[in-house]
Image (cartoon, rainbow, N blue to C red):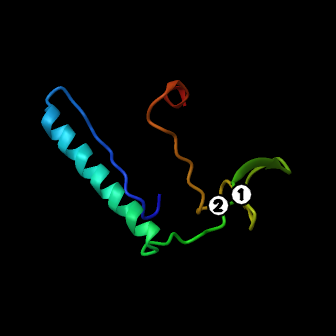
Amino acid sequence: MKTKPSLTLELDSHSADAGINTRIEAALDIMESYLELCKKGLIKEKEEEFSQTKIISKNNKIIIQNNKEEIPITDKRVKVIFPSMGELSTKA
């Protein structure tokens, strides 16, 4: 998302409609202002090259591979994260 505005709402049974509507309206106002600034050239996103990371098996080892290098999964720079929700992560 970089500099793009976004809105995340957490709702529970105590959330009031007026408060939610106010937050949505404020977010829309910010997003409209962002688009205007982009049209005027005052905000420019920096283009970055994206390369998909792959997990492959090579020489009986699991390797993390991107365009630049191959890293063993045991490398200290590699972090494996399991999401906290879902059937597969619960079993893991």
The tag on residue 72 is 1
Looking at the image, residue 38 sits to the left or right of residue 70; the answer is: left
Query: Do callouts 2 and 1 mark residues in contact (Cβ within 8 Å)?
Result: yes
Residue drawn at (33%, 48%) of the image? 7
The Cα–Cα distance between marks 2 and 1, rounded to whole angstroms, is: 5 Å
- Tell me the residue that label 2 is attached to: 75
Give x and y (percent) for residue 55: 72, 48
Q: Which kind of residue does numbered mark 2 sit on?
A: Asp
Is residue 15 visible in the rendered image? The answer is no
Left or right: 85 as drawn, with respect to 8: right
- The residue type indicated by label 1 comes to Pro
User: Is 21 positioned to the left or the right of 63 in the image?
Assistant: left
Question: Closer to the camera, 50 or 85?
Answer: 50
SS at circle 2? loop
Residue nearest the viewer, comparing 60 with 48: 48
In the displayed structure, does residue 72 sit left or right of residue 81? right
